[in-house]
Amino acid sequence: MTQPADDHALDQRAGVSELRVAGRTVPVPHSGGHGEEELPLDRNQAILQAAKQVGSLLKRTGLPFALAGSVAVYAHGGTQNLQHDVDFCIRPEDAEAVSAALREAGLNVYTPPEDWLLKADCLGQQVDLIFRLAHQPVTAELLGRAERLSVDSVLMPVLAPTDLLRSLLAAFSEHHCDFGAVLPIARTLREKIDWDRLRGDCGSDAMPAAFFFILERLEIIERSDITSSPEEEHR
């Protein structure tokens, strides 16, 4: 998930050969994790399998969590065109317990330089355990709005569509503003999103406002005065 820094930058770091794991430093594995020998050949299926396995482990902890990112979009009815990792939201106060549970199950868990997530490796796939989403700590209220959905036959809480899109819009900046990646998500989930609430939350910010304007021009959403252009305001 791209928030609040670009995830692609994590993959492109040069010269970073090790990360911290549970208080010690170890080399970053090129692959591995629990059950690597069962890695599916299809990348989308591999990501789904990793999401199901980690989701099942998180359910056993009894701690609140929610699936996020591209797999959450898929769970809400999007196409199976998954990105390069699996995202889960957890509360900051649960990070240590979640990390311990995943390590006990045989997964490698890492603390990256970024201070808003943990990383794990499952079936050779990167799993992000995010405890700061859209620049704010993940809360019980956010996780309480999650919907219990089937993710390739495994039931788990999935971030609500409005919260999911808000997290993507909040990541927009002058250095990262990939409307093209978020546009199909907004189109797919438009009937499930509370657009009035979303506009009220972030419609006054320049990048989300520009994105809403594009959605209106494409007739994906209805026009709102919140996103009207300066020329229209002076008419």
Image (spheres, rainbow, N blue to C red):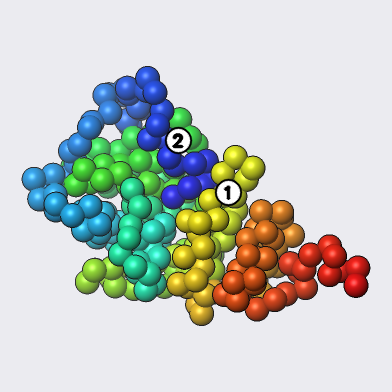
Q: Nearer the viewer, residue 193 or 175?
A: 175
> Circle 2 — which element?
helix
Label for residue 177?
1
Q: Quadrant of residue 24?
A: top left
On the rendered image, what quadrant is the C terminus found in? bottom right
Residue type, numbered disc 1 = Cys
- Residue 16 in view here: yes
Q: Nearer the viewer, residue 140 or 13?
A: 13
Instruction: Find residue 20 and report its horizontal and vertical position in percent.
Output: 35, 27
Q: Is residue 159 above or below residue 32?
A: below
Q: Quadrant of residue 33?
A: top left
Q: Residues within 10 Å of mark 1 (few under 14, many from 20)?
A: some
Q: Is residue 194 above or below residue 159?
A: below
Q: Residue at x 32, y 23 (%)?
A: 18
Farthest residue toward the right?
Answer: 234
Look at discs 1 and 2 and give the one toward the viewer.
1
Look at mark 2 in the image and give the residue it sits on. 9
Q: Residue at x 53, y 51 (%)?
A: 178
Instruction: Find residue 109 and report its horizontal and vertical position in percent.
Output: 30, 38
Instruction: Find residue 27 and report its horizontal and vertical position in percent.
Output: 26, 24
Circles 1 and 2: CB atoms closer than 8 Å: no
Q: Residue at x 66, y 53 (%)?
A: 207
- Residue 65 in view here: no
Farthest residue toward the left?
Answer: 37
